[in-house]
Image (cartoon, coloured by chain):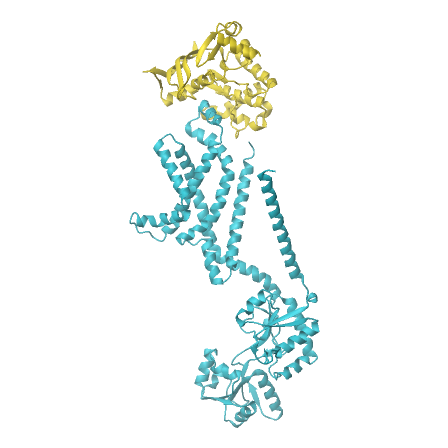
Amino acid sequence: MNKKNVFKKLIMTLLCCALLAGIGLSATACANKGSSQKNRTKFTIGFDAEFPPYGYDNGSGEYVGFDLDLAAEVAKRNGWELVKQPIEWNSKDLELSTGAIDCIWSGFTINGRQADYTWSKAYVDNSQVVVVKNSSDIKAPEDLVNKIVAVQADSSALSAFTAEDASEENLNLAHSMKELTQVGDYNSAFLNLESGAVDAICMDTGVASYEVKTRAKKGAEYRILEQRISSEQYGIGFKKGNVDLRDAVQKSLDDMLADGTFDQIAKKWSLEESVCLGQLGTDEAYLQDDREDISTGLISRAIDIAGQLLSGMLATIEIFLLTLTFSLPLGFLLMRIRACNITILSLLARIYISIMRGTPLMLQLLVVFFGPYYILGINVSTSFRFYAVIIGFSLNYAAYFAEIFRAGVEGIPQGQTEAAQVLGYSQVQKTWKIIFPQMVKRVLPPVTNEIITLVKDTSLAFALAYTEVFTLAKQVSAADASIFPLFIAGIFYYVFNALVAWGMSKVENALKYYD
Amino acid sequence: MNVLECRGLKKSFGELEVLKDINFEVEKGKVVAILGPSGSGKSTLLRCMTLLETLDDGDMAYSDMTVCQSKDGKASYVSKKDLREVKKKFSLVFQNFNLFPHYSVLKNVVDAPVSVLRRNKKEVTREAEELLAKVGLSEKLDAYPSQLSGGQQQRVAIARALAMKPEIIFFDEPTSALDPEITAGILRLLKELASQKMTMVIVTHEIDFARSVADEVYFMDGGLVIEKGSPEEVIDNPKNDRTRTFLKKLEK
């Protein structure tokens, strides 16, 4: 039982662990993917507990609200246990993406977030519209200039014109009005409108259509401007791509709408004028094809980031190829100098190799780049940055290659040189016909190692602020607030190295024709 | 006429005097065998004569070409350019064959005449094929050395040496890396070359072979030539005690 055997066993154990972990992960992934809603036992909704009447603490430690009642009914119909999970609003996305909650159901505004979630149909329309007399010359919101507009006190309409987060357009519009009057209730608002005391009323779309409809029966002619002051619908947000759960929930909601349960609950919370489930002809957020979106979403995101990293990848490949182009011949030359009979040259080569191998590559890059200025007083231009990277890498790798080559040459039997000498080959012929080809075969495995290290070492170019793929990935990663770009860069390095290893093994195989 | 003539060859490695004062000559068309125990200086002598080692002192000449002359107790070599010409006069067959592993059998034989002697490749190839047929390797032209047995490799090495059309071929214990049954074949080949009046110098431990093929036998010990003469004189009736002891040891 020698060390080798123990080591082998250790490796095998590690490999087995990795394999099992891999199987476990992929199994979990499959399970997640394939989980149908039938197996679901719990339904966890995330909500903002300070948002009445949709969801709030009723003062006795109980969470109540329109959304929670809807969710409870949906859960009941599906045989799920409802878990009401109050969430910190800022971490709602994290909660959702980690699966801590199944959906965000909390008077959640769809508008502006269409692409970020898989959405239910809009079920509350909180848009603000303008109601005018049928005979009025007001055709669009901009016609409200110099007019008197009524809104309910403490209403969404008032916020749409005056709140801090109101659009600049609406703020300007409110400013251009003759007056923005606040009224106690809609009835008085319509009385004012009828009497001509106000020119228009701004209100919730649900309430507006209800009022206009009922008043039309009494002979009063009003119309709602097509262009809304603000557009806002609430929906239930699911994790992007979780169409299965969304469909199950939506089906229950649709059933509840059909059998009147939905309207009952709406009435309970006095939201019967605001609910809009099934009323919107086109519900873009709901209709977007999220299933397609998730796959192309991930791939297109990967492609998008890969595109952003492309210039970096090319820079990395460039550094790699140029470094090899210069360092391999330079390494060979260095090896020859080190082996030559002229003591002083051989010594210099040894010192050079010793320094290059004994100091950090990053430090060498800095010296190459800043050296001309600090040592020689030459101003370096920005374009020198690139040359400095190539020079630094080539000088460093040449030292390593020189030693690899030396080992390769020293491994060739003395008899080869002697045979060449006796046969009368010149020094040049001996080197290139006999020594070099045999050396190449011998050094391939260590050179492959070194080249693979080089692929990864190219990232050190960041020391000179040269933007290769790693530097770029870090930047994109910071901008994107995710490690995805780094992951893509990692894949790039891995694939690059896999290609290098594959290529080198091809070369090795090609040289296997002799021993 | 002597193909090779050496006078007063001296060679030391540091403190160790390996060649003490060697006189050596080879007549055209003759076979010279060098016998002697390990460390006697046979191999060093061969390496000096084939320019793999530099002599400390002495005179050496191939036919009409001087290699080095003794000047003030030091061997003074001719120019490198002249040495290149000298190298065309001889070939060496190594104990370990030293074929080029990355060249095919044919290329091993063809390459030197083409790249060193600048001869026509077609012509050399034709000759090489003949030579390889002669050593019994017509079937192996495209094989690589690693695919051959030791005996086959040594045959290729002999063909490679012959392809240079040297005036003299040195053999450094050509069979000591081979199995006994294969040795016989190689020795037969050398005998055949001898019968064709190829000038050869062979360092060997095969006494019977030396007796049957050599025109002249040198017995070396301690960096000196102890005895030289016909096989009958040196092998069958050695005058020197050391020769006798050595031969007796070999008989055991």
Is residue A352 rendered to the left or right of residue A494?
left
Point out residue B106 in the picture as x, y percentages from the top left corner.
54, 26
Given the current orientation, which residue lies at the most extreme bottom position? A195
Query: As rendered, which of A84 and A134 lies closer to the eye?
Result: A84
Chain A shade in the render? cyan
Point out residue B41 in the picture as x, y percentages from the top left corner.
45, 16
How many discs mark residues in the rendered view?
Answer: 0
**A86 over A382 or under it: above or below:** below
Point out residue A194 in the picture as x, y percentages from the top left corner.
54, 93
Which residue corresponds to the image point at 62% horizontal and 89% vertical from the top-left? A214
Given the current orientation, which residue lies at the most extreme front position? A1
**A190 over A312 or under it: above or below:** below
Quadrant of the frame with the N terminus of chain B: top left
**B125 over A32 or under it: above or below:** above
Point out residue A265 in the picture as x, y percentages from the top left corner.
65, 81
Given the current orientation, which residue lies at the most extreme left position? A377
- Residue A194 visible (yes or no): yes
Is residue A189 rendered to the left or right of residue A377?
right
Chain B shade in the render? yellow
The quadrant holding residue B80 is top left
- Residue A115 visible (yes or no): no
Query: As rendered, which of B204 and A286 lies closer to the eye?
Result: B204
Quadrant of the frame with the C terminus of chain B: top right
